[in-house]
């Protein structure tokens, strides 16, 4: 409406000044029309620059997330830095366990991502801030400006279980490359065999009457424990580089 008021004031100022023969009345009405014009311009600028008539409204949504890693034994949150300064990142995840495509957080500098550890569900809590008109009166006057429901910023709080690993896309590629190399696998096979043997011998010393089934269980547990420990050491090494 304020845009229409501005146009009307311009037209009236022209009509009053040109077509009224009474110069005192013409000048007075023209001055009033110009004041209305300047007032309209003032509030239009204030609405656009200082967000006059608007206030911030926050909406919150929660999305359960799943690892984008192909390994079920190593759930992972992968992020891609935006720009060379690494001040902003895009985090990649899946929205269901069987999803074929991945999703990611918004690639905007106005998006803030925070990682927190949890014992509950892995999830993203998103808080988006938009500018909305304070009431119907402000909407009536400034609705044509297009400043209503304008995006301001958003914050994603990413809750992850402790067994999730957080790596950059570059680090994830490096991890996959090293873990799949023949030299690494050969080294780990030798070390794992020695570790498992040691654990089985220790268990049998505690329980000499251990059955074959119990020995197998200890072997499997020891192998899984070594594999997890070796992977964490490799991840720590890659993060440190």
Image (cartoon, rainbow, N blue to C red):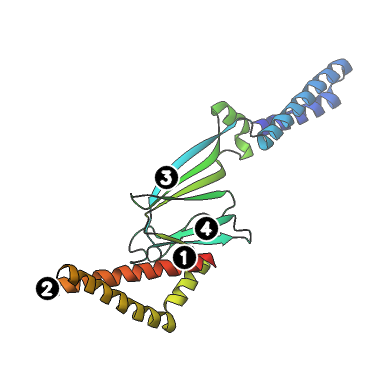
Mark 4 = which residue?
90
For marks 4 and 2 on the same chain, the one whose residue lies earlier in the sequence = 4
User: Can you tell which quarter of the image residue 185 is in?
Assistant: bottom left
The residue carrying pointer 4 sits among few (fewer than 14), some (14 to 19) or many (20 or more) residues within 10 Å by Cα, namely: some
Q: How far is the residue under mark 2 from the one under mark 3?
A: 53 Å
Q: Is the residue under label 1 in contact with that under label 2 (CB below 8 Å)?
A: no
Asked whether the viewer can see residue 70, the reply is no
Q: Which comes before the other along the chain, label 1 or label 3?
A: 3
Residue 182, given in percent of the width and then of the height, sits at 42, 84
Q: Nearer the viewer, residue 221 or 80?
A: 221
Tell which residue pokes out farthest to the front in this image. Answer: 205
Q: Toward the viewer: 5 or 12?
A: 5
Q: Is disc 4 in contact with disc 2, using a CB cutoff of under 8 Å?
A: no
Q: Secondary structure under badge 2?
A: loop
| Residue wearing tag 2 | 211
For marks 4 and 2, give the one nearer the viewer: 2
Q: Residue at x 11, y 73 (%)?
A: 211
Q: Kindly state the secondary structure of the residue where label 1 is placed.
A: helix
Q: State the separation of the CA atoms marked 4 and 2.
A: 51 Å
> How many residues crowd mark 3 within 10 Å: few (<14), some (14–19), many (20+)?
few
Q: Secondary structure at mark 4?
A: strand
């Amino acid at each position: 409406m304020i845009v229409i008021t501005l146009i009307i004031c311009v037209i009236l100022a022209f009509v009053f000044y040109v077509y009224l023969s009474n110069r005192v009345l013409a000048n007075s009405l023209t001055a009033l029309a110009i004041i209305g014009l300047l007032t309209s311009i003032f509030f239009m600028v204030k609405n656009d620059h200082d967000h006059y008539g608007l206030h911030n409204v926050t909406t919150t949504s929660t999305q359960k997330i799943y690892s984008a890693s192909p390994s079920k034994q190593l759930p992972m949150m992968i992020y891609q830095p935006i720009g060379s300064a690494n001040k902003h990142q895009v985090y990649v995840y899946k929205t269901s366990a069987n999803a074929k495509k991945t999703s990611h957080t918004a690639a905007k500098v106005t998006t803030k991502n925070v990682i927190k550890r949890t014992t509950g569900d892995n999830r993203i809590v998103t808080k988006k801030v938009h500018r909305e008109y304070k009431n119907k009166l402000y909407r009536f006057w400034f609705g044509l400006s297009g400043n209503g429901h304008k995006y301001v910023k958003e914050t994603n709080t990413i809750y992850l279980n402790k067994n999730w690993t957080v790596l950059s896309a570059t680090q994830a590629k490096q991890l996959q490359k090293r873990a799949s190399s023949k030299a690494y696998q050969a080294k780990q096979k030798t070390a794992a065999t020695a570790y498992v043997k040691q654990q089985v011998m220790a268990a049998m010393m505690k329980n000499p009457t251990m059955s074959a089934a119990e020995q197998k269980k200890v072997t499997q547990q020891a192998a899984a424990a070594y594999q997890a420990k070796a992977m964490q050491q490799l991840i720590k090494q890659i993060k440190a580089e």
